[in-house]
Amino acid sequence: MASAPGPLLQAEHVVKYFPIKRGILIQREVAQVHAVDDVSLEVQRGETLGLVGESGCGKSTLGRSFVRLFPLTDGRIVFDGQDITRLSRRGMRPLRRELQIIFQDPYASLNPRKRVGQIVGAPLAIHGIGDRRERKRQVQELLEKVGLSPEHYNRFPHEFSGGQRQRIGVARALALRPKLVIADEPVSALDVSIQAQVINLLADLQEDFELTYVFIAHGPGSASSSRATSPRRSTRLPAAVSTHAAATRPRCARSSSRRSWTTGTGTWRPVTTL
Ligand SMILES: Nc1ncnc2c1ncn2[C@@H]1O[C@H](COP(=O)(O)OP(=O)(O)OP(=O)(O)O)[C@@H](O)[C@H]1O
Ligand SMILES: [Mg+2]
């Protein structure tokens, strides 16, 4: 599909409230969780936008709303020049190839009963790409790209370490050659010693696959979310920051100013402070 000019992704005044229901036979809505409240941002092609904030402030919900995993309460999402806010499941189908997500937890996001070949090849099969042999070839090539071996094709997820599992998740996300990848804390469940490997892998793949990333990370001093089930006042993400990832790695440390973030090799430019 030809690319439209302008940003790859625009979120305008995105609002997502989750209902809290009570009742056994008849469920009544008793309150709402204000997960995302009026967030606007743009993601330019080829860049990495970092979404940083405390636990429970709505980062995953916002990331999931970009790939339309649920309907929005209000606001608009424009992907590649097309308003996808109210597209039907069928209308979203061709776009599913271009919008992918890497989940926070590599242990929970892979089906333990499926072999790696099936997991990584599923998006290809669903979209009817190639025959069995061709899909196997593509999956083995992807496994190599993410630093695994083609021989891993027939193994089950439990036979891999956390870092290797996340590589499987990355291979699955890249199978359809997406334009935008939402990486939702892709290394937070991993051992510190392998976090850098996965981050570096994502940065290298960005060039190879011409990817645009929304990279979700915890802000420094993040607290655990104990208010997750109670309705709250509107929450806002404290900062959204953006960088050209070719020049930097999506790793951040807080600088003296609340609004500027630094990486090892450059400064993350805040595109919007929410
Ligand atoms: N499906 C859901 N139903 C009800 N409430 C939800 C749902 N998903 C998220 N929430 C609530 O929305 C708020 C934001 O959750 P979200 O998972 O987006 O936070 P987060 O910033 O990603 O946190 P973390 O850094 O811990 O991953 C939380 O209060 C959470 O309990
Ligand atoms: Mg989250």
Image: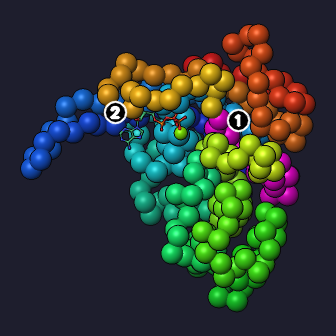
Please tell me whether residue 207 belongs to the stretch shown in magenta: yes
In depth, the one of 231 and 131 nearer the eye is 231
* Picture coordinates of residue 168, whole percent (x, y): 68, 64
Residue depicted at 65% across the width and 78% down the height: 155
Is the CB atom of the residue marked by disc 1 within 8 angstroms of ligand 1's nearest atom?
no
Q: Which mark is residue 229?
A: 2
Q: Residue at x 76, y 29 (%)?
A: 252
Q: Quadrant of ligand 1?
A: top left
Out of 142 and 129, give the one closest to the viewer: 142
Q: Quadrant of the N terminus?
A: bottom right
Residue type at mark 2 is Thr
Whether residue 67 is visible = yes
Q: Which residues are magenta?
A: 200-217
Spatial CA span between label 1 and label 2: 28 Å
Image vertical order of residue 45 relative to residue 95, above or below: above
Image coordinates for residue 240, horizontal then vertical, percent:
65, 26
Mark 2 CB near ligand 1 (8 Å cut): yes
Q: Position of residue 100 (x, y in %)?
A: 61, 55
Q: From the image, which quarter does the C terminus lie in? A: top right
For the point 24% across and 29% down, which residue is it? 31
Q: Residues within 10 Å of mark 2 (few under 14, many from 20)?
A: few
Residue 253, position as x, y percentages in the image: 76, 24
Quadrant in which residue 59 is drawn: top right
Comparing 231 with 163, the one in front is 163
Find disc 1 in the rendering and name its residue: 49
Judge from the rendering whether residue 20 lies leftward or rightward of residue 42; answer left or right: left
Q: Is residue 87 left or right of residue 249?
A: left
Compared to residue 251, the image places residue 162 above or below, namely below
Location of residue 221 by image quarter: top right
User: What's the amino acid at mark 1?
Assistant: Leu
Kindly state the secondary structure of the residue where label 2 is placed.
loop
Residue at position x 62%, y 46% in the image: 189
